[in-house]
Amino acid sequence: MTVTFNGVTLADGESRTARVASGLAPNGQINFEPLEFLRAEWAIPVARGNRLITLPMVIEMPPFTRFGAALVSGLTYFGNLPDEGPLVITEGADQVTFSSAVCVDCKIVDEILGVSHALALRFVCGQPLNATLSPLAMLNPSYLWNLSTITGLTGGGSTKLDGLITLDVAVGCRAFITPTLSGVAQPKTMGLITDPNPGVTVTQVNPSAGTLIVLPADYNAITNPKIWTEL
């Protein structure tokens, strides 16, 4: 599960590494898995007319053995926490967005050895917008993904690069594919970029003619000006 608030990540659902200055780890690092981030009950209706809801959420931070490390981590967290903005919660392919959420409460709720490690946040949100993410949108954009099922560049469908949904996919997504070009399987690394010439760029799938360019089937010069280009 991932939770972002006005672009700031509250929970990323992945393993993290806490760097500490102690004898607990010879290399100065302690690996740990995050606990469940959502501890409280889900949405509680508070005003049916305008559909405002309160959303309680507890963020578990790693426990620290030194007060100084905990203080730096806590100050950084509080300093980066916005007052209001879009709150986005993603679990698998399901995504819920509150476009104008307000963080009305933020307090420490637990302590271990005198060092706080859990923060309770309470948001006031409006009407939620539910969406189902496309397969590519569910992938971490910082990775190069091996899309072994893609066997061609054009033609539509789940086995062709232009058939993949890109509307909800962030620019910068990279895919390693092995399409069949001129009768030969050729490994290619393709990246999703913003079209430099919306409405003018055309698909180019001839390897001998230059850089490969593929316009997705859901390409739109105004609402979705993203194209695949060979990296």
Image (tube, rainbow, N blue to C red):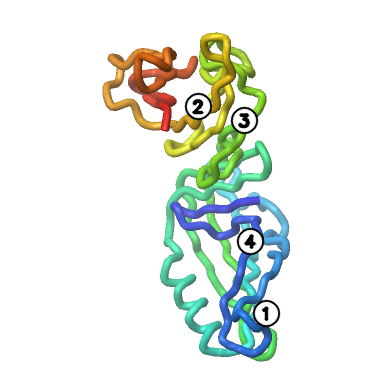
Inter-mark Cα distance, 1 to 4: 14 Å
Q: Earlier in the sequence, mark 1 or mark 2?
A: 1
Marks 2, 3: nearer the viewer: 3
Closest to the observer, 178 or 9: 178
For the C terminus, which image quadrant? Answer: top left
Circle 4: residue type: Met
Circle 3: residue type: Leu
**Dot 2 corresponds to which residue?**
166
Q: Earlier in the sequence, mark 2 or mark 3?
A: 3
Disc 4 residue crowd, few under 14, some 14–19, many 20+, Cα 10 Å: many
Marks 3, 4: nearer the viewer: 3
Circle 2: residue type: Thr
State the SS at label 3.
loop
**Dot 1 corresponds to which residue?**
110
Q: Earlier in the sequence, mark 3 or mark 4?
A: 4
Circle 1: residue type: Asp
State the SS at label 2.
loop
Disc 1 residue crowd, few under 14, some 14–19, many 20+, Cα 10 Å: few
- The mark found on residue 57 in the picture is 4
Inter-mark Cα distance, 1 to 2: 42 Å
Marks 2, 4: nearer the viewer: 2
In the drawing, does residue 198 fall left or right of residue 1? left
